[in-house]
Image: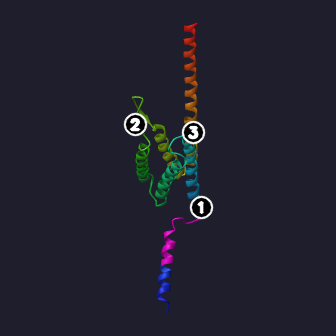
Amino acid sequence: MADPSQAWWQQIATTIASEFSDVPDAGEATRIVVRLMVAGILGGLLGWEREHAGKAAGIRTHMLVAMGAALFVLVAQQVGIGPADNSRVIQGIVAGVGFLGAGTILKGDGDGESQVRGLTTAAGIWLTAAIGVAAGLGREMTAVLSTVLALAVLWAIPMLHDATQGRSQRGGKEKDKAKVD
């Protein structure tokens, strides 16, 4: 006759093994790791740009947002949720990240004028979540292309703005010199 405590421990071991059975094979494990890593790396790139620009939401925040969004849609796919129901998961992500982004927006008075700050950071967090969703759904190339375009916007637009501001300021100084001469 078997020892009752041995049967009890066997039941515990079987239960623990079944709790970790959501990854049936190496292919599925690889898929999960790749999708979460892609989300984290791409989110980290956007976060690095924000941190480099001196913004509060930096690398870790963006990585966590991207990986969290990817995980939500990835787990939904694993349990068999279809595209129509997965759209509700995505809606929840969009709404939740909207609240997170709202927390980065500050309104204050600077020199007597009302100023709103943090809109670009909020939009970046929102886009980071979308990139995470794309990676989590297995649309890694869409996520990569979106990140490249986002980085182009975050880097190129300020440079373009500075270049045009420099011209307009130089043009104004030349006009002032013309008036003095």
Is residue 155 visible in this depiction of the protein?
yes
| Magenta span of residues | 12-25
118 and 81: which is toward the camera: 118
**Mark 1: which amino acid?**
Gly
Q: The residue under label 3 is which amino acid type?
A: Leu
What residue did someone put label 2 on? 107
Give how far apart the Cα atoms at labels 1 and 2 are.
48 Å
Residue highlighted by disc 3: 151
Which residue was labeled with disc 1? 27
Give percent across and percent down for residue 58: 53, 45
Q: Secondary structure at mark 3?
A: helix
**Magenta run includes residue 26:** no
Q: x and y percent of residue 100 in the render?
A: 43, 47
The picture quadrant where one finds residue 107 is top left
Residue drawn at (42%, 39%) of the image: 106
Tell me which numbered mark, 2 or 3, is placed earlier along the sequence: 2
Q: Secondary structure under badge 1?
A: helix
Question: Does the magenta portion include 19?
Answer: yes
